[in-house]
Image (spheres, rainbow, N blue to C red):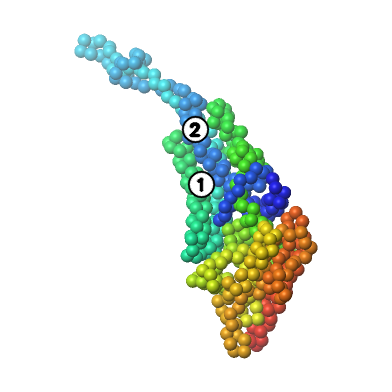
């Protein structure tokens, strides 16, 4: 694998393997260590594997591994039957002859051993429990992203369709598990109690042998999942395109820098980094909001307090909203995987295309508030940030995964940190004075 991508994958996996999934964006196929596969993908693959195998498992149990027994049946018809040995099955006719009234027939029956089915039900319950955890977490990611991605453009509608499709995949997995469970119950026509005990004797068919080979991976997925997925996916995984991996990698580094300065996040930021959303940071009773991939529109008020002007819609990667002297202010970071100067300089567009909903007053005259800074992050091999205008409103932070230095990003983040604390604390003091 490309060393640049490998470093992104390794760092993102250390934070959360969910960040490797395509999400709203295009995908790339790579051959890599199966440990990089996200838990959601792994679970859905294992559910597909197990539920897809169950019809054949049940059929083999009925035809190959069934226990053959016989049932004694008494019938008034002599066809395919023999004389009964019960005295009650004979009666006298008018001539006092003793004649058979019932005949004895031996009927073969097939009896299923329910122990393998009880074990299968146990495996389904394990998958159901895991799915409930993933479902709860991922649905929150999706719902938060739906709020962030609202808009009337075709891009917004496509993103919404993608998010709803992700939700549908989870619902489909739940349906597959329920259908498989009902298949087992209908097979025996009675209540089945799950059992974690491996059935002994174990069924001998090829499908049951295949299940046993992978059973431990289903029971202990964290320990055995990489090998399991290697067999399922043949060493190829689907991950987000490199630009989106880099964007998320920059986001992880950005939040880590704020954390090192004492800002705390009370919620898991994985969902926002994965699908877009809001990350709230707190320090000294001051709140700062990091909006990830917000869709700002001219016709719709965004929860961040900012809107788009001049163009119909804009979509910065990171919109950092802080307290300001007369309301809220914003700092923008928009990573790019290219070192091209012209492309990096295009990030300055956000200084003019984004404005706060509320205005400020200067000498009694209302003025529009635009973002204070709109910078790019790029994989540059430089030890310091690069300014692209004399006031430092736009520039580039060097963020190269293979030549990583925390200091340039820390210098940029510290400016926001100081600004937020200065105006946030100042506003708190003003509020206290008013209360007195």
Q: Residue most toward the bottom?
A: 363
Q: Is residue 194 left or right of residue 331?
A: left
At numbered mark 1, what does the secondary structure look like: helix, strand or loop? helix
**383 w.r.t. 25: above or below:** below
Per the model, the C-alpha gap separating discs 1 and 2 is: 19 Å
Q: For label 2, count other residues whose C-alpha is less than 10 Å away and answer few (under 14), some (14-19) or many (20+).
A: some
Residue under circle 2? 56
Q: Is residue 3 left or right of residue 167?
A: right
Judging depth in this view, the residue of 365 and 421 nearest the camera is 365
Q: Residue 367: percent from the left, percent from the top?
A: 59, 82
Q: Residue 34: percent from the left, percent from the top?
A: 65, 43
Q: Residue most toward the left?
A: 94
**194 w.r.t. 255: above or below:** above
Q: Residue 332: percent from the left, percent from the top?
A: 64, 68
Residue under circle 1? 173
Determine the residue positioned at 48% across, 35% down: 55
């Amino acid at each position: 694998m490309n060393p640049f991508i490998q470093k992104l994958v390794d760092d993102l996996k250390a934070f959360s393997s969910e960040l490797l999934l395509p999400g709203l964006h295009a995908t790339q196929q790579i051959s890599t260590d199966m440990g990089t596969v996200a838990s959601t993908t792994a679970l859905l693959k294992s559910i597909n594997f197990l539920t897809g195998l169950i019809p054949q498992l049940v059929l083999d149990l009925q035809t190959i591994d069934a226990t053959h027994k016989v049932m004694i049946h008494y019938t008034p018809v002599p066809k395919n039957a023999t004389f009964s040995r019960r005295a009650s099955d004979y009666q006298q006719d008018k001539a006092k002859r003793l004649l058979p009234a019932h005949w004895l027939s031996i009927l073969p029956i097939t009896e299923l051993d329910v122990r393998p089915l009880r074990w299968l039900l146990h495996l389904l319950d394990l998958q159901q429990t895991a799915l409930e955890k993933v479902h709860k977490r991922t649905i929150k990611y999706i719902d938060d992203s739906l709020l962030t991605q609202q808009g009337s453009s075709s891009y917004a509608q496509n993103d919404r369709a993608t998010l709803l499709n992700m939700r549908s995949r989870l619902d489909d997995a739940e349906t597959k598990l329920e259908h498989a469970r009902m298949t087992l119950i209908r097979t025996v026509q009675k209540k089945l109690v799950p059992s974690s005990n491996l059935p002994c004797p174990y069924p001998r068919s090829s499908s049951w042998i295949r299940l046993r080979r992978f059973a431990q991976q289903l029971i202990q997925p964290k320990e055995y999942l990489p090998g399991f997925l290697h067999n399922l996916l043949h060493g190829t995984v689907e991950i987000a395109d490199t630009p989106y991996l880099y964007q998320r990698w920059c986001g992880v580094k950005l939040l880590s820098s704020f954390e090192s300065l004492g800002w705390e996040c009370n919620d898991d930021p994985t969902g926002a980094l994965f699908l877009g959303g809001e990350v709230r940071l707190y320090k000294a009773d001051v709140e700062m909001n990091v909006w990830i991939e917000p869709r700002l529109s001219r016709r719709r008020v965004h929860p961040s307090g900012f809107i788009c002007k001049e163009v119909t819609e804009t979509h910065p990667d990171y919109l950092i909203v802080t307290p300001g002297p007369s309301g809220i202010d914003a700092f923008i970071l928009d990573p790019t995987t290219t070192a091209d100067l012209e492309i990096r300089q295009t990030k300055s567009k956000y200084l003019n295309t984004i404005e706060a909903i509320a205005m400020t007053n200067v000498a009694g005259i209302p003025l529009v508030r635009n973002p204070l800074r709109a910078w790019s992050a790029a994989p540059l091999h430089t030890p310091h940030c690069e300014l692209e205008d004399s006031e430092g409103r736009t520039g580039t932070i060097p963020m190269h995964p293979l030549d990583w230095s925390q200091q340039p990003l820390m210098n940029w983040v510290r400016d926001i940190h100081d600004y937020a604390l200065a105006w946030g604390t100042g506003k708190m003091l003003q509020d206290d004075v008013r209360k007195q």
